[in-house]
Structures are given as structure tokens and as C-alpha cells.
Image: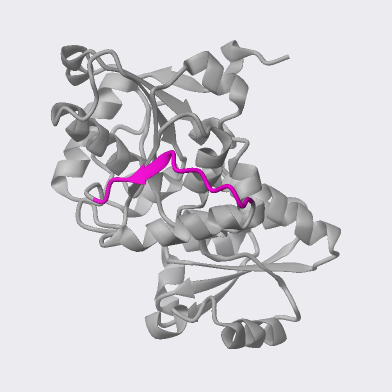
Amino acid sequence: MFNPVSLPISRISDPVLSANGISLDMLRLDLTDEVISGNKWFKLKYNLMDAKSRGCKAVLSFGGAYSNHIHALAKAGLDLGIRTIGVIRGEPEYAKNPTLSDAIDWGMELHFVNRKDYRLRSDPGFLSHLREQYDCPYIVPEGGSNALALKGAMEILPSELIEFVCPDHVILPCGTGGTLSGIALSCRDTPVLGIPVLKNAGFLYDDISALMGLVTDNVPDNWSLDLEGHFGGYGKVSDQLLQFMQSFEVNNQIQLDPIYTAKMMLRIFQRIELGEYSRGSRLLAIHTGGLQGRRGAGCSAVPANCT
């Protein structure tokens, strides 16, 4: 039976919320697993099950030097006894950073490519070359975003949870748009807002529609994007963001990651102050995990003892 008491949901406290009559809850996907946390667990689950069922001996995927997806895949591969290969955008010296050092320790083989070649990550010829080089691995796209990832992401907000929280709006950060696609599909009657962490992310409108089209002919229109929440672009961590993180974490005892969730939360507060939500609105923000990214993003000044 569904047990709402066991849900990893935290009520957020802040003077901005009380002054504007807004209720803000946070779904704590960061608590799903100690390492493979957040949305990555949901997006990888069915991909790895499919790889195992097909008898594949290796899984290959793509990411940047601080990729949460690559980090999670490496640990999942270790746990499941599957060889993993990460095609990394950047130079071999990036292997010394905390994210990729973990991946190497967990047995992942790293294949570094320059930015030009990385743009070919969906090119059939490039993928064919990788299959030949690594003995026909199971290939998962960047960020894990494919039809099987959507199947997993659709489990993040089951109907029982929506009925329990009754949010007027669901809000989450976006990279490739896979998690938003799954959530929008699973709660069609609730507005879902994605906050991309990349600059010039308007292309996500087409990408998200295409992802949903992989699993349904009835693509919902309950979702939208706020393109003003990148705060400088992917991987950019400003003083404003760090100051917000420090204040938020002291007030709520919840750690944020600076690449995704912190930007989402800062943008939510900006939207509230801009009057985007009417008094009495109930917001549900999704903490997508990725706390390992704190190590390489100048977060040493932020409290580390939050739950």
C-alpha cells in the first residue's frame, strides 16, 4: 500500500515564501541512493536491465568531465558487474577530477574526444566506429535520455504522490530534457516547468517533444521551459549562486548541487518575487541529486553537514 509518510519530501522554509503566500515542497531524489542518486537512477534502470537481458558485456555512454550521468553509470556498472565505457568531451587530464577519478576507480574506461568529435555522438558512422572499437557495447545516449529512460522517469511522480501533495506546479532543472519528458507524461493534468541549465536552450522544445514521441502518439502540452535560469551557462557557478546556496542550506539543511538544483531553486525564488505564482499556490520542486558535482564547483564555503 502507498505510504505517504515514507515519501522523501521536505517542506522548504523562507521569508520569500511566507511573504508571498506560497507553499514549496521538495521531492528528495537525492536520497534514493548514496551514489546513484536522483533522476539518474530512474533513467539508467531500464537501460541497464535491457543491456543485461540482451547479454551485453559492456555499456557505453557520453558526457562531460563532471557528468552526473557518467558518474552514476560507472557505479552502476561496478554494482552489476557490467563493463562501462565513457566517451568524455575534453582532454585526458580531466581524468584527475573527482568525478572521473571515481569513474576510473569503479572500472570505467574513458575515451576522450574533442568538442568537434563529441558533436558526432548521435552520428551513425561515429557510433559504428565506437561499436567496432569496443566490441559492440550497449550504447546509451548522453544523459541517458531515450525511450527506456522515459519509462523510468515516469515512475518519479506516480499518481499516488500527485494526489498526496496536490501541487499546482511541478518544477525541475533540465539538461537533456529526459526527466521532464517522463514527468510530464506521468502527470498530464499538472503544469510542469523545466528550468534548463544551459544557455540558448530553446532547442529543448523540439528535443523534448521528440523524446515524448518515442513512447506515445499523444504528446501532452502540460509542460513549458524557463530559459532564464542558467545563470551564466552550463557549469558556470557565480557568486550570486553560491550565496544563495549558502543561505538556502543554512535555512533548510538540504544540500544542493550547483549545476542543476541550486539554479532551479534560485530561479523559483526569482519567479515568486516576479509574481509568476498566485498567493496560495502549491509548488513541488524536484531535487535531481548530483551532489557529487559540488566537489568541483567551488562549493567549499557551503555547509557540508546538511541532510
* Residue pictured at 26% horizontal, 28% vertical: 248
Q: Position of residue 285 (x, y in %)?
A: 39, 30
- Image quarter (top left, top right, bottom left or bottom right) of the N terminus: top right
Q: In the rendered view of the protein, which quadrant contains the C terminus?
A: top left
Residue 58 rendering spot, x and y as whole percentages: 73, 68
What secondary structure predominates along the stretch shown in magenta? loop
When the figure is inspected, residue 303 is found, relative to residue 15, above or below; the finding is below
- Write down the quadrant of residue 269 in the picture: top left
Q: How many tags in the picture? A: 0
Q: Position of residue 59 (x, y in %)?
A: 69, 66
134 or 196, which lies in front?
196
Q: Is residue 300 above or below residue 94?
A: above
- In the image, the segment drawn in magenta is 216-227
Asked whether residue 38 appears in the rendered view, the answer is no
Image position of 123 (left or right of 139): left
Colour option used: one colour
| Pick the front one: 164 or 74 | 164
Is 72 placed above or below 61 here? above
Q: Quadrant of residue 131?
A: bottom right
Name the residue located 79 percent from the left edge and 68 percent from the top edge: 57
Residue at 32% from the left image edge and 52% from the top image edge: 197
Q: Is residue 44 above or below residue 223?
A: below
Q: Residue at x 62, y 58 (%)?
A: 214
138 is within the stretch colored magenta: no
